[in-house]
Image (cartoon, coloured by chain):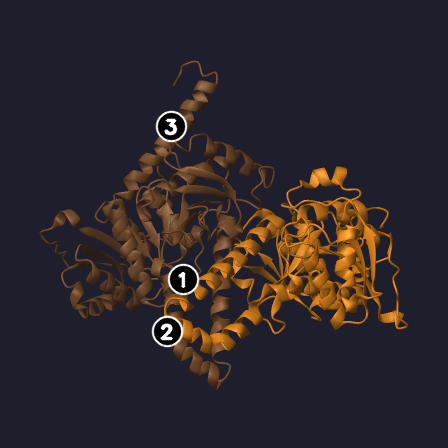
Chain colours: A brown, B orange
Amino acid sequence: MQTSVTVGSDSASKTVISIDAMGGDLGVAVVVDGMAKAAGENAGISFVVHGDQPTLEPLIKRKQVLEGRVSIRHAEGVVDMHDRPSHVMRNGKGTSMWSALESVRTKEASVAVSCGNTGALMALSMIRLRKAPGVKRPAIAILWPSLNPQNFNVMLDVGADIRADAQDLKVFALMGASYARNGLGLERPRIGLLNVGTEEHKGRPELHEANDIIEEDAALNGFEYVGFVEGGDIHSDKVDVIVTDGFTGNIALKTGEGTAGLISLRMRESFKNSVLSRLSAVFAYPSLRRLQDRIDPRRVNGGVFLGLNGTVIKSHGAADATSVAAAIRLAQQLAQLRFTEKLAARVASGMQNRQDEDDSKGSSADGS
Amino acid sequence: MQTSVTVGSDSASKTVISIDAMGGDLGVAVVVDGMAKAAGENAGISFVVHGDQPTLEPLIKRKQVLEGRVSIRHAEGVVDMHDRPSHVMRNGKGTSMWSALESVRTKEASVAVSCGNTGALMALSMIRLRKAPGVKRPAIAILWPSLNPQNFNVMLDVGADIRADAQDLKVFALMGASYARNGLGLERPRIGLLNVGTEEHKGRPELHEANDIIEEDAALNGFEYVGFVEGGDIHSDKVDVIVTDGFTGNIALKTGEGTAGLISLRMRESFKNSVLSRLSAVFAYPSLRRLQDRIDPRRVNGGVFLGLNGTVIKSHGAADATSVAAAIRLAQQLAQLRFTEKLAARVASGMQNRQDEDDSKGSSADGS
């Protein structure tokens, strides 16, 4: 049932990426198109693909660039977009999603990419890959278009968990900083904590506590802490990483996407209003195209699950081939940088700093 | 110190609006420009204006349309944008903001409009006007550009209070429905509760409880309850009123504004990229102008404070004359409709329905 993987001679730079081919809204063909696109750009990528073999095989054979670079793992089951995470945790074995994570667990692949159900993917990732030491709540981090030189900010959590206490927010700061360093190449990222005002007296109690503990050893942890930021700062150049709980982050993410969608629709309507405006759209096309390229969310498709023993990338459910390719490109980059290991070390050391400090402040008799 | 108010013969349609002229980011002249603009459009509006008389008087005299329609109340103090609400509550007497609310409290004016510090304005409104019966937490409601036939949805709370329990959210639903009926002319508005997913098992416990109690007597309260909505639905035609707590609502509002700002900036950059794109902008101008008109937040400037014994409109701090005029137009509309009274009746009756139901379910012996 299994096609063999052909690994070239330059094995040092080879990256094996595990792909859950099922469960995306636009079907399997789009996923294979995305794989071909990413493979064409980078000879160092090969794949283990999980899903329905009779469907996958002919699609993959049609792509010459994938020849000898794909191993297919047949999986009968598919996690549906509407399956509840708790149901998938009990019954997910045998699905392409489970199988895709298994490849990361056994270290056959470095990173898993899936377009499937986010909640189910996080639930299965937690039971298969387990949380990294020091992490109570994993988080989903995304890249958000911004005015920064790197054009994107990191925001987390955007929906792994609806809760986060002050300690969790501290871990999010450490993980977000590590992602900004490895994903965006920022030496010393600036971290902000999302709140309804920038004054220290504003917002919820857990945010005040988090504000204190994130700040106290920021320098030791290799980031700069800029304090509270507001919704209007998510796109700004004041900050590189926005830390928040998964409820607030999810609302902010979807509100931003919705706003962009509404403007884009209204823009198309404006240019279709009359013959003259249709003509003007022809002249404006290169400018509008340039705009589209700069704010296109497909360019940076992929929420990254942070805080697990392995890296998992959730591609948008409605991802097209361009988006899938972007998610694979990100997977390749993070794998090359050995991101999972670096992040784990950063969290361990960040929480250790804090442990040391607590001990020296406290009355612990054994000095551990 | 006081200019007399000249009221014309058609007193039935006359509306007196109380204006806090101080504390906006762009200064007093912009407020007076906005008053003149609104007065020019509607002969039924007159004003009581609160602030520094030596500054206000010459500005008002210069506007012919305002002649005989403005009464100036001199106030020495100004609430600063950075003053803490608790400080203003103790020391706010004598400020233009206090004075502007006083005109509503004494029923000299129907509605107050201020461009000042939101937190301070809410704090002073609560101590001067007091909360309406049945309202534990007042809320700030705004209009949000949407795909609905009316082009705007209502969202509340966007920042009066960072907390809201299930009962508060129920009151927000009643107040938001009343605002949509009076402010947008919707007979039977559709209400949604903001959450991270539309499935009933998702989100925080207080949202599940609110989901039940908002639904139970929706028909009696004259609205349709559509259940949970997500951030991406705020701009949609699925819903007319989005109910949420003030923390989440504030983050969503500012994120939406930030996203629109980023896109607008990138669009200008795109059209300035080359000589050709500058030229194309000339051709595209009418279309871009039409787009701007449709999504321009200045057209609907004004957060309305709901749940007080009196209506207060918070205009944006950086409001220009167009924005101030829009806030005054909204004030006039709500005053004409006797909105404060209607909203109070709606909340009282909505909470009474609930009370009746609780009593009939419970074991209350006296049957009250």
Q: Position of residue B322 (x, y in %)?
A: 65, 65
Is B178 situated above or below B170?
A: below
Q: Secondary structure at mark 3?
A: helix
Q: Amino acid at mark 3?
A: Gln
Which chain does tag 2 point to?
B
The residue labelled by disc 1 is A295
Front residue of A14/B90: it is: B90
Q: Which label lies toward us, 1 or 3?
A: 1
> From what the image shows, is residue B51 above or below residue A282?
above
Q: Is residue B267 among what the camera can see?
A: yes
Q: If you read the primary sequence from the N terminus, does the residue marked by circle 1 or circle 3 appear first?
A: 1
Is residue B182 something one can see in this rendering?
no
Quarter holding residue A360? top left
Residues beneath discs 1 and 3 located on the same chain: yes
Q: Nearer the viewer, mark 2 or mark 1?
A: 2
Q: Dot 1: within a 10 Å radius of its alpha carbon, few (fewer than 14), some, or many (20 or more) residues?
A: many
Tell me which chain the residue with mark 3 is part of.
Answer: A
Q: Nearer the viewer, residue A254 or B223?
A: A254
Q: Secondary structure at mark 1?
A: helix
Q: Which residue is mark 3?
A: A352
Can you say whether B106 is above or below B232 in the image? above
Give whichever of B142, B171 is nearer the camera: B142
Residue drawn at 48 percent across, 66 percent down: A261
In this rendering, the answer to whether B186 lies above or below A257 is below
